[in-house]
Amino acid sequence: MFGLFKSKQEKISNALIDKAIAGQSFLYKLFLKNLECDKSNIRKLEISYFVASIITANYLRIGEKDNNEEILNSFGIGFLQKSLAESGEKISIGTVVKEYQARFSEYHGLLWLCFNSDNSTTGNPTLTLLLHVFECVTNSSAVPYMLKLCEVSGLTQAYVFEHVSFIKKLKS
């Protein structure tokens, strides 16, 4: 009723879902306003995959080690179900999970470089990540948007790194 009887795992999973939903809104607005993308060119589920990847990658790095598989499975399924319901797409949750798993494997390596920039060959791993995200979300080339993407790469970096603080707070 008021969350009094929820397990610690459930509370963490729900907090991750709430954080992810807020992240979707932030990134959707970034695509609409900062990058000036047309609504019809933004695949909301792709934004969801990126947000879930950020949370999952950071949680694996610094989150609770006990029961992290259960927490992340609960978060992933719960968040993806909510995202699918709001996306307007008519696909199965199984398809959504498979798409997310594929995207996570792509994003995970790019996110790792954001935290280990000495290993990046591009000089700006956040921009590289953002270019990939843009092309996935819009299903189009990022080249015409390069200047705008450079302008928002700092916002994207702050967004990615802010999750570290959030997950550390969950642990305490």
Image (tube, rainbow, N blue to C red):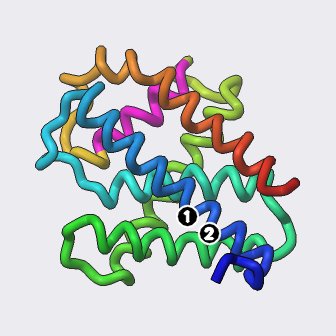
Identify the residue shown where x is 18% and y is 35%: 37
Q: Residue 32, relative to residue 56: is it above or below?
A: above
Q: Residue 47, relative to residue 1: is it above or below?
A: above
Residue under numbered circle 1: 17
Question: Is residue 129 part of the magenta span, yes or no?
Answer: yes
Residue under numbered circle 2: 14
CB within 8 Å, label 2 to label 1:
yes
Q: Which x, y percent locates residue 149?
A: 34, 23
Identify the residue shown where x is 88% and y is 54%: 172
Q: Which x, y percent locates residue 144?
A: 19, 23
**Magenta segment boundaries in residue numbering:** 124-135
As shown in the figure, which amino acid type bears the numbered disc 2? Asn
Question: Is residue 134 part of the magenta span, yes or no?
Answer: yes
Q: Residue 39, relative to residue 104: is it above or below?
A: above
| Residue 169: mark | none
Q: Magenta stretch mostly in which secondary structure?
A: helix
Q: Which of 28 and 46 is in front in this view?
A: 28
User: What residue occupies the far front of the structure in this picture?
Assistant: 2
Q: Which x, y percent locates residue 126?
A: 52, 29
The Cα–Cα distance between marks 2 and 1, rounded to whole angstroms, is 5 Å
> SS of the residue at dot 1?
helix
As shown in the figure, which amino acid type bears the numbered disc 1? Ile
